[in-house]
Amino acid sequence: MTNNEVHPIVWTGECITLLDQTLLPSEETYVDIQTVDALVDAISRLVVRGAPALGAVGAYGVALAMVQGEREDWSADELHENILRIRNARPTAVNLAWGVDRVLPLVESGLAAVVADADAVSAEDAAANRAMGRIGADWIEANVERRPLRLLTHCNTGTLATTYWGTALGVIRELHERGLVELVYADETRPLLQGARLTAWELDRAGIAHVVQSDGAAASTILRGLVDVALIGADRIAANGDSANKIGSVSVALACKDAGVPFLVVAPVSTVDLATENGDDIHIELRSGEEVTTLAGIRVAPANTQGFNPAFDVTPARLISAIITEKTAIEVAQGESPKSKL
Ligand code: MRU
């Protein structure tokens, strides 16, 4: 990692230090998370967010609960209940539960064993992201003709959303390193603006040419022929390839299908949930309507108007050209699925 890289999740030995993503890009503030209450609150408020990052935080969260449990003399049941609270803090990204479940069997071996495995979760995610970057960039080089490339992405899938480098943004970084990127269209990602605040911040730091557009502009930008490939991440991928990601993703996929533009989902194997048959069974987080009826804390809708705020949508497999994992590209458009390939 270079000095320019941020470290959004750090285990200090006693607590988890998180880069507060709600304050970016105007403030780069780190918060020490000392208790399970504080961690559940941080996950719910999106101080830390993004599926693979939630996987790492879930794993370190078990260590945090053990430290607090030792300090406050919790019973085994109390420890277990608190670990479950972390596991259930957000429902859609399978990685959160996956990260908790991965280290859970090590609790009886002690804190050092749990921390060592959480460190491994983090390191494996970083390596997976570099592999996805290469596999995704190779896929694009082989399947997309125009040079240099004009890319579109939705939400934030970079270092901030993972442990290092990123998934869809990792492919974009790799393409940039290969000298192939002309411009990235970053969708602003209403209502919490992960695209405008976080993706633009990462692209800027990486020196990658980009513009931010409103979510409503994306379909038009694609249909006008301004985009060569669209890339997004995922929070949960069902066995048949249906993929849940930030609300607005399916609109991008529909426009790409109509325009004949490749649409890629880039995610580690830890985001694939083979136990979920298809997208109908994915639990979509419904967040407070106030996130939609307000803008930067100021009410923009009439006082009596309620907001409707599903945080994710499901892109059906039929709209996805390929799912890029660290193992392989799954050619969904050719009839492959995670179930048949992983
Ligand atoms: O609500 P968020 O910000 O956690 O949503 C994040 C996304 O939808 C990301 O695209 C997804 O988690 C993949 S991150 C590599």
Image (tube, rainbow, N blue to C red):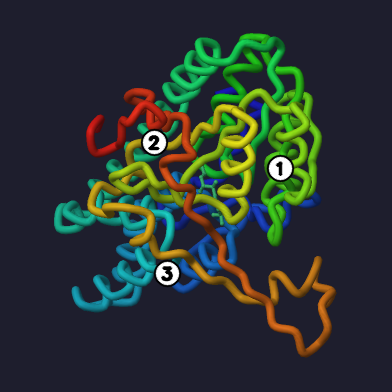
Q: Quadrant of residue 127?
A: top left
Residue 185 lies, in percent from the top left, at 74, 34
- Residue 219: mark: 1
Name the kind of residue labelled 1 in the image.
Answer: Ala
> Where does label 2 land, which residue?
268
Image quadrant containing the C terminus: top left
Image quadrant containing the N terminus: top right
Name the kind of residue labelled 2 in the image.
Answer: Pro
Q: Is residue 150 left or right of residue 114?
A: right
For the residues carrying marks 2 and 3, which lies nearer the camera in this image? 2
Q: CA distance from mark 2 to mark 3?
A: 27 Å
Picture layout, residue 285 above or below residue 340: below
Bin the neighbour count of mark 3 within 10 Å (Cα to Cα): few under 14, some 14-19, many 20 and up.
many
Q: Is residue 285 left or right of residue 247?
A: left
Q: Are marks 1 and 2 in contact (CB under 8 Å)?
A: no
**What residue occupies the far front of the structure in this picture?**
258
Name the kind of residue labelled 3 in the image.
Answer: Val
- Mark 3 or mark 2, which is nearer the start of the sequence? 3
For the residues carrying marks 1 and 3, which lies nearer the camera in this image? 1
> Where does label 3 land, which residue?
36
Q: Secondary structure at mark 3?
A: helix
Q: Are marks 1 and 3 in contact (CB under 8 Å)?
A: no
Asked if the beta carbon under badge 2 is closer than 8 A to the nearest atom of ligand 1, the reply is no
Q: Nearer the viewer, residue 224 or 326?
A: 224
Q: What residue is drawn where x is 81% and y is 35%?
A: 211
Q: What residue is drawn where x is 49% and y is 39%?
A: 319
Residue 237 lies, in percent from the top left, at 37, 46
Q: Is residue 68 left or right of residue 76?
A: right
Q: Nearer the viewer, residue 106 or 157?
A: 157
Q: Secondary structure at mark 1?
A: helix
